[in-house]
Image: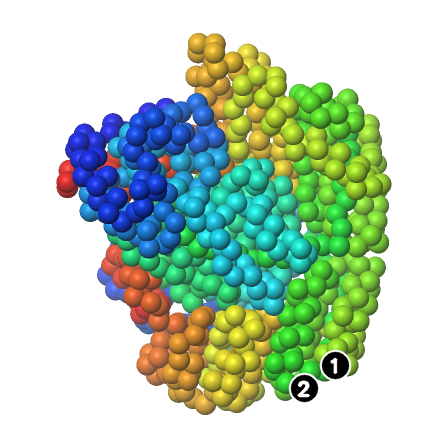
Amino acid sequence: MEMPTPNPDVLRRKAVVLQRLLQVLPEDAVIHEPSETRAYECDALTAYKCPPMLAVLPATTQEVSDILRICNEEGVPVVPRGSGTSLAGGALPTADSVILGVARMNEVLEVDYDNRFIRVQTGRTNLSVTGAVEEDEFFYAPDPSSQLACAIAGNIAMNSGGAHCLKYGVTTNNLLGVKMVMMDGSVVEIGGAHLDSGGLDLLGVICGSEGQLGVVTEATLRILRKPEGARPVLMGFDDNEVAGHCVSDIIKSGILPVAIEFMDTLCIKACENFAHAGYPDCTALLIVEVEGSEAEMDYQLSKIIEIAKRHNPVELRESQSAEESAKIWLGRKSAFGAMGQLNDYMCLDGTIPVSSLPEVLRRIGEMSQDYGLPVGNVFHAGDGNMHPLILFDANKPGDLEKCEAFGADILKLCVDVGGCLTGEHGVGIEKRDLMHHQYTPADLEAQMAIKDVFDPNWLLNPAKVFPLDASESRRAARIAAE
Amino acid sequence: MNPKTEAELAEMVAGLKEPVRIKGGGTRGIAGPDVAIETSELTGITLYEPGALTLVAKAGTPVAEIEAALDAEGQQLAFEPMDHRGLVGTSGTPTIGGVVAGNVSGPRRVQAGACRDFLLGVRYVDGMGQVVKNGGRVMKNVTGYDLVKLMAGSWGTLGVLTEVSLKVLPKPEVSATLAVQAPDVTTGIAALSAALKSPFEVSGAVYDPNNACALLRLEGFAGSVAYRSDKLKSALAGFGDVNRIEQSDTLWAGLRDAANFHEESGDVWRISVKPSGAPEIAGRIQADRTLFDWGGGLIWALVPDGTDLRARLGAFDGHATIVRAEPETLSNLGRFQPETPGLSALTRGIRHKFDPRGLFNPGLMG
């Protein structure tokens, strides 16, 4: 993975930049010793590492503003960081960058049940947002797998999803407003407790902009009343295509489950060995979850089971208790850990039209043979978001490169069948150079034009999202100007 | 100008010398330069997969055609776009491109989301005459910046939409409405709020001061609606008498289209506010008639011709948009709420990038 050469002028001015930052931040908020900056050398895409020049941990919006203003004046790239759980390298530093971590800003600022929102500082973790309102039977809907650790700041940057977005949508559908610091240090407020924008929907473009437009320090989030109950049904099939048809038939029947999860043979076996969830030995496994009162769940599940039976399932198990529900989910939720026991793996995140599922799984199987690397598939089947997990051995020379090439081929396939490179993880550095496959130069130019407006010097997380060749002239213009 | 293909449109835009008005069905009362670019030849549903809940259509496709196709599969546009014709006094055929360009969303917005939340992808021609696509036709897509949301509600000022992809949803089996007699706005909004924070999935929450009545819609499978309406009825008993209305589709279509205002003369505004703030805001504006949708978060207000409603509002968290007024009022006051200087600079910057020659609907959005 190529990253731009660090700007020697910036590296040379490290002491000056450090001095200026220390004037606006407490000493313990500025990390400059190489032994300590190393803690920020990577995010959850651990294959790529590079310690930053400095890391700062502001505690207030004012401090964020001071940091950005100084870095803007000094021409120093800034890489914003939530909890560092990005699987796409969204928080990967460059050697000439300052990491701006928002972890110290984690307060709940306002909870308003009458208007159904919560306002938080964005260093707060996803799960602890729900934690703040759970006692009163409310929750925050987007639930990425990393929700125990990931920060709202990162969720907004990547427009994170989760298993339940078929019904509740992703971050952008649950974000009502932000306070954001621009690269020049100015602070803007967008949206709030009211709905929709009175002008252009800037909130919509900020969400998912991967920390390239500004640093969001406060967020107003929609909270929802918890449903009375939730219950899954597990079904096994001996054919991927049949499982795909079953998903489509459930959706066409008028039922909108909150989640439809799919796993293939390799994942089923790995999860079963790891979590002992009682999964059947089959080719394709579906977990379908519905919500509501007892009677509503009974009704929906009976319809779903009736549809499933038409597709000759090898296993059909409706949860009869909370323990059983937890067990059904346990296997799925431990999929990443279970696969990690088999070998190192790379987790992909393409989305495909649901109707292409059988074809895509067949092609992935063929590619797996060609590359000689096993792959397991977990899949948010209701919305087409796939997570192929390619197994490789990081210690075996050439395996990582082979895995990357295989992954790129899978993602291109997702685009070719009408889908996209990333459904919820973001582009980061991981899919950056594949963007040409999905977008024309004019498509990319329109997106980069947005960054030109928000961050004219291209200092915020500059080497991400866009192919390096596409963004080069803009990044070079900044360096030339210094 | 009425291009037959996207490519022809692109060529036309590249050759433009004067500003133009972007016109879908022309039903939403948007004025502008005499020369219009129309999308009435860019029509047709290009893809519909009921099992994937997705539909792709050319921008000029009539909304009615899309709704009929969805209806045949028991599905719908869940954001319930309003038909502006009755209110604005226009004729013509509402198009899906117009719905998207205006981010037009009805009562179900409070539960299901706005048009922008259902928009998966767009194709458009920018002010340089370039064809640009963003998003796609899948439900989860974070590949690059989300210009899809930006295009929704940009009223043609950033580009001419040529094709849109939408997420669709199953049509509910039945619906029922609870009518709560609530003597004043404060009680009415409190009743809406109590319903919306219950677990009973209210999909419409309107307070109509004319009838002193809070209306709450429940949708879904018959058994579920029966169960939830019983539960909600008891939960709301403290606010006033509660009655159940069985056939309420016409009622909600009227609320969606602000039918109560059609025959009344005067200007019509939409004000987006924090729902619990609605009673106080309503007090400030002294309107001749109001209707509170979105649990109080959307105030429809009728005021005498030419009234500067924003002056009456003063500073508030939200925005006020003119939906119907004389051209003079629109040009004096501006259709859209002026933005703060910081946001205004961003908006102008984006518009300059997308339409550097200022060709599309000039002056419409600041």
> With respect to residue B136, does B4 lie above or below?
below
Task: Sort mark 1 into few (<14), some (14-19) or many (20+) by Cα contacts within 10 Å.
Answer: some
Can the viewer see residue A380?
Answer: yes
> With respect to residue A190, does B187 lie above or below?
below
Label 2: state its secondary structure.
Answer: loop
User: What amino acid does circle 2 point to?
Assistant: Pro
Label 1 resides on the chain identified as B
Label 1: state its secondary structure.
Answer: loop
> Is A223 situated left or right of A313 in this image?
left
The structure residue drawn at horizontal position 67% and vertical position 70%, both measured from the top left corner, is B194
> Is B331 situated left or right of A223 in this image?
left
User: Split into 4 quadrants, where in the image is the C terminus of chain B?
Assistant: bottom left
Which sits in the foreground, B280 or A288?
Answer: B280
**Alpha-carbon span between mark 1 and mark 2:** 8 Å
Mark 1 in CB contact with mark 2 (< 8 angstroms): yes
Can the viewer see residue A470?
Answer: no
Q: Which residue is mark 2?
A: B183
User: What amino acid does circle 1 point to?
Assistant: Gly
The structure residue drawn at horizontal position 43% and vertical position 67%, both measured from the top left corner, is A198
Q: Which residue is mark 1?
A: B240
Which sits in the foreground, B88 or A49?
Answer: A49
The structure residue drawn at horizontal position 49% and vertical position 88%, both measured from the top left corner, is B286
Where's residue B336, x and y in %?
39, 72
Q: Quadrant of residue B183?
A: bottom right
Task: Sort mark 2 into few (<14), some (14-19) or many (20+) by Cα contacts within 10 Å.
Answer: some
Where's residue B47, x and y in %?
57, 46
